[in-house]
Every structure is written in C-alpha cells, then in structure tokens.
Amino acid sequence: MSEEKIFFPSEGLKIEGLLHQSADEGAVVVTHPHPLYGGNMHNNVVHSIINAYQQKGYTTLRFNFRGVGLSEGSHCQGIGEQEDVRSALTYLTGLGKTSVDLAGYSFGSWVNALGLTGFDTVKNMVMVSPPVAFIDFSFLGYSPKIKLVIAGSNDEIAPPSMIEKMLPTWNPEAEFRIIPGIDHFYWGGTDEVETIIKTFLNKY
C-alpha cells in the first residue's frame, strides 16, 4: 500500500518518515532497530508490522530516528529518540487520530517502553523482540497498554525465557507469542509476525 514521504519536527530537528493514510480511526507509530547497528525504518520486521496494520485499515507512520537516513541530529542513547516517538504521535494527533497504537522492534521497542508513561495517546503497545539480554529493561513496570510481545525461539538478544520472567511485571494479561526456529533477525519469520499482529488486531 502506498506511503508518502513526510518530515515532522522533533526538538527543532526534521525527522524523516513514511506515512500511509487511511480513513479509518486506527493508527500506529512503528519504530526501528538500533541505529548504530544499521537499523532504519526500511527494516524487514518494521515492514511486516506496517503491512499487518495497513491490511487492517490503519493509518501507519514509520520514521527514522534522529541521525538516521534523512533525519537530522545524531544518535542520543534513547533519550532524544523518545522525543522523536512523542513527535510522531503528535503528528498523528494532528491528523485527527486520538487513539494510536505504538509498535517497535528491538531497540525501537526499548525506546517505546522508556517513554511509555508519558505517551498519553497510546492505546496498545506491541513489542517485537524487546532486547532484554542486550539493554536493561528493569525500569519497565506495569502498564495495561502492553498488549502483545513477540520473539523468536532462537532469539539470543530477546530470549523468550527472559521475557517470560519479566512479562508478569509488565502486564500479566499481555499475549506472548514465540515463533519457532527464528532468531533476532526474523529471516523467514516475517510472515508469521504479520499473521500474529493481524490476529491480535481482530480484537480491536
């Protein structure tokens, strides 16, 4: 489905994004993996999340964190990146979207989690491979907004065994789906990510 290139402001920086507009109420902001390891909004997993939401009639906005692609600024250890997420949510609010999902993959899911308590317009949060073995997630307490977590069974950066221990703290009612035989990079597993998210969205 078609997306248009846009730019939106974040703390005085111009942030590059791709927007797909739908007439339906639903909308989602999707964040990408670690910029220092080549992560950007064109990532395969980001694309699968976008596809799932678009097929369910949602407006979608994915963007490059500051310092990535044509986004101005430089990597900011998750602090400035939270402001980029907030600005993306604000952009969608400006389009009349008052209840927005927030989905992220790897580093993106960590940034989303960091800012979650301040993201008032977020309805549901989807976390794909939160990198719990790579970055500290001890800050993350209970949030009813955390609704779906996905990981591969062979994911060494987001090990399912570690996520299972943390999930009761995050939200004991959240769904946790493990994709067999898949590691952190989801080669051969993105179709399953799409299917899981579309099934999840059928409830909303």
Image (tube, rainbow, N blue to C red):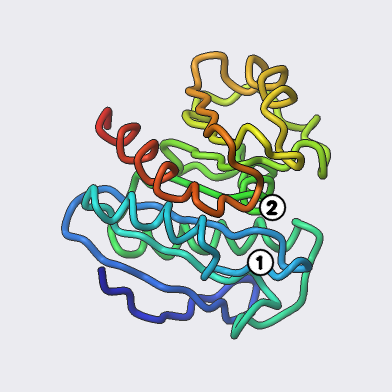
Dot placed on the residue nearer the N-terminal end, 2 or 1 = 1
Q: Which residue is mark 2?
A: 107
Could you say which is closer to the camera, residue 101 or residue 175? 175
105 displayed left or right of 169: left
- The quarter in which the C terminus is drawn is top left
- Mark 1 lies on a secondary structure that is loop
Q: In the rendering, at what x and y percent does residue 80 appear?
A: 72, 63
**Disc 2 + disc 1, Cβ < 8 Å:** yes
137 displayed left or right of 69: right
Name the quadrant containing residue 14.
Answer: bottom right
135 displayed left or right of 103: right
77 displayed left or right of 5: right
Q: Amino acid at mark 2?
A: Phe
- Mark 2 lies on a secondary structure that is helix
Question: Residue drawn at (26%, 66%), measured in percent from left and top?
Answer: 21
Report how many numbered discs are placed on residues in the image: 2
Q: Which residue is mark 1?
A: 39
- The quarter in which the N terminus is drawn is bottom left
Could you say which is closer to the camera, residue 44 or residue 77? 44
Query: Hey, which residue is sitting farthest left in the picture?
Result: 23
